[in-house]
Structure formats: C-alpha cells, structure tokens
Image (cartoon, rainbow, N blue to C red):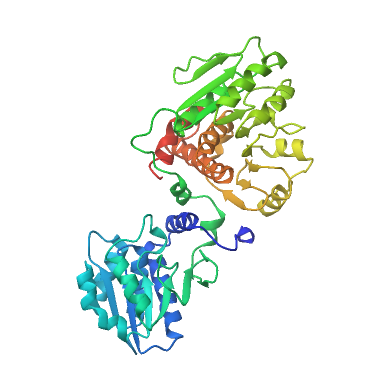
Amino acid sequence: MSGFLETGLITPARMRAVDRNAIALGVTELQLMESAGRALAEEVLTMNPGRVLVLCGKGNNGGDGMVAARHLQRGMETDVCYLDIGARSPACDHQVAALRHCRVGLHPFTSRDDLAQLFPLFDKADVIVDALLGTGITCGIREPFATCIAMANESHAKIVAADVPTPGIRVDWICAFHRAKMAGSMVADIGIPAEAECCTGPGDLTLLRPRNPGAHKGVGGNVLVIGGGPYQGAPFLAGLGALRAGADIVRIASPVFEPVPDLIFERLTGDRIGEEHTERLIALAEKADVVVCGNGIGTESHAVVRAVAPYCKKAVFDADALRLPLPVASGDTIYTPHAGEFTRITGITLPEDTFGRAMAVRGAGIPGTILLKGHTDIITDGNRVRFNCTGDPGMTVGGTGDVLAGIAGALLCQLPAFDAACIAAYVNGRAGQAVADERGRGLIASDIVDKIPAVLFRKG
C-alpha cells in the first residue's frame, strides 16, 4: 500500500484527517507532537543561535513549539511567550506543565500590554519560532496575536514557522511536519504510519462539515434513487442508506412499491423501467442533487440509464447500471463495481493481489471515481488511490452494496466524489462490523442501515 502514498502539497483538512487516522492506529497525539517539536528544534539548531524565543498559541501548534523549547533548553537562552487566555488543547496543556520543570523562561501573555513588557525578548532573540496558530486558524488575526506578529516582524531575528506560518508574519524558514502545506517548506518526517494516509479511517470523517443549527429542510441533500423492477428491495435499501447518511430528501423512482414511509415513492408504470419513463426520470434527475442509479434495475433498462445520465448533476452508478456504454453524469460521478462488474465495463481481469488490483483500477481510464468493492475496497480517481479495510465476511449477503451506494449518494451531496467514496466505504464497513459484533452470523443489509449514524456522525 505504501507504493500509493501521495506526494506534493497537502491541505490542512487532509492533514488533520491523516493525523486522526494515525492516532486511531496507535500513535498517540503526544507522540506526534514530540516528533514534530524535536524536528523543529533540530531545524533551529542548524542556525547556531545564542538566544531563541518561541511564540506559542493554545492549540497543538503551540504544543509543538513548547516541545521544541524543551529540546532547546541546553546550550542557549530559550524563552517561551504563550497565550494564556481560555482553555488550551489537552496536549498543549501537557507541554506547559512539562516546561515548568525546564531551564526555559516562561512568559504568559493575555493582552497587548503584556507583550509590550516582553519587548526585550523579541529585541534580543537570534531566532524566533512561530508556533502561534498553525493549520487550525479559521478567522482573521485578532489581538493580542496581531501585536505579537508585529513585534516579531520588527525584530532582527530569523523566524522559523512550525508547519505553516501564522498569517501576516514574515518567515525565513518553514519546518513542515509529514508533508508540506505550502511551497518552499522544509519537510520533517514525524513517524506517521503509511496506513494512516493510504487507508480510510476515522480521520476521514473530519472532512464532513457540521450541520448549521439554522439549516432548513433540503440543505442535507436531495437524492433520487432509480432502480427496482426485477429486484424490488434494492433501491429502497439504497434510499435508506442515503437517509441515514444525512440526505434530507430521498425519492425512489421504481415500478415496485415498498412501504417505507421515510422515502418518497415516485411510481413508474409496468414491471420494469423502460423508454416510456425516460422523460419523467430526466425531470426528476434535474431536480436532485445526486442520482443513485442501477440498484435492482435488471439488464433491460440500460438505454434509459444512459439517456438520463447526462441530466444528473452528480451520480452514483451501481449494479446493472455498470454496463457498456458506461453512463456518465454531467458532474462528479462514482462507480461502485465488484470485480465481475469491473471486468464487464473494462475488459480487465483483476489479479488476486491488492497491489495489482489497485494498479489495474487506477489505470482503467474510467472518467470518474471508482469504488471497487472487495475484501479490501479500492478507491481511485485515476490519480489518487485509497484502500478501505473495514467490513465483515457476513457482508457478502445481498443488499449491502445497495446500502453502500446510498451512503455514497448522500455524501456526494456534500463532498467531492473521491472523498465521498472513501468515507462511504469506511462507514459501510464499520457499520457492518458493528452488526456482526452484536449479532454474529445472520447479518442482513437492513441491519447495517441502522448503524450508519453512530459511525458517521459520532466520529466512530
């Protein structure tokens, strides 16, 4: 899997996900902070300073700076100016406690006046370490940070930023942790497991935006499921998966009715979806944020699927929609084949080994995101590759793929296709594991539906 590690710049949001995945794999937050702070200290030491000033906020970036100060306590004069308003992150608080036993000058500040008293520290420093805000900043710079930044900028010291510079501060070096967040950074390896980046995990759930308390009906997404006929339950399982994954409104366009009051039923005449339904399905697709298509639809409706696809803003194509010519939506598209369906749409027979499968899927040339279902799910957009190892052998039962398609459809309302597919695979597998842990053998797809919210929205 490590052969699929991504390179280049990483966004702060993705980095938070990787950090959280590493913690879930057993590398503690304090271990990551210790590695980052030590790397930062080593970068400062290359400048041979006589006096160092470390500027720390109250988050984990501040904690990184405090670790660096602890490693710089011998051989030079080291001072730490840290914000002392409100609660610090637990890891940062841990570092403050440790620094109280070190040969380091500790200088809390709460206001511009406090900083004015600390001016000599800025004036005498050879190196200033910027560990004020890091990647966690979500608003503009306020006091007393603004004054702290101005004093650093006016000093004659070299400035080294921890991970990313605080907005507005001049910087001479950037010591980035794990991967660079901006061009020109020096990157320090802090021991994050390859699996934290190559595989899905609970950290991926941090990409989900919290729902606005003032949100109105529909903001969570409007999903249309097109399917049913030969296999009547499939579109309703997909619809329930979408609802449980956060979609506000889910319509089922099908010739077959199932009494599920939470789903809006759009009745189609006859016993199969045919060309006579095309105009109506196009109208429904144009109103939906995402269309999930193919669940239980059978082999005789592909012409309709292809006719409707260009009118879908975004789409998830599953099951019998996965035929040639392949349907393509006007926007983001996710395809969710198992190995046999993948061979049907590409002509490629997949090897047994995971690495070989991933290479084949990434190179298939399909225009969109592929979520290849299997013992290890493989998700790719033709460039990035991610693996999902959650799930249970009992999930070979019929209907679990329909639930997965519904989850992907709901997430696609809020996220780019690749992220939606990764999280959908993770959540579906974890929900299946939760059912198996409770019930053992005899798992059915509808059991998984009820476990989705606990995994997805409790950050499980």
Q: Which residue is drawn at 24% across and 73% down?
A: 115
In this rendering, would 87 be left or right of 235?
A: left
In this rendering, would 147 be left or right of 192?
A: left
Quadrant position of the C terminus in the picture: top left
Picture coordinates of residue 17 (x, y %)?
47, 54
Picture coordinates of residue 139 (x, y %)?
36, 55
Picture coordinates of residue 40 (x, y %)?
42, 76
Quadrant position of the N terminus in the picture: bottom right
Q: Residue at x 39, y 62 (%)?
A: 28
Q: Nearer the viewer, residue 408 or 311?
A: 311
Quick one: which residue is furthest to the top in this view? 270
In this view, 459 is above or below 178: above
In this view, 422 is above or below 315: below
Quick one: which residue is furthest to the right in this view? 347
Q: Which of 296 and 367 is in front in this view?
A: 367
In this view, 42 is above or below 6: below
Q: Which residue is drawn at 74% across and 23% down?
A: 303
In this view, 415 is above or below 43: above
Q: Nearer the viewer, residue 352 or 43?
A: 43
Q: Can residue 190 be seen in this view?
A: no
Q: Which of 222 and 21 is in front in this view?
A: 222
Q: Residue at x 76, y 35 (%)?
A: 344
Q: Is residue 252 visible?
A: yes
How many labels were placed on the picture? Answer: 0
In this rendering, would 257 be left or right of 160?
A: right
In this rendering, would 185 be left or right of 51?
A: right
Picture coordinates of residue 79 (x, y %)?
28, 80
Q: In which quarter of the image is residue 327?
A: top right
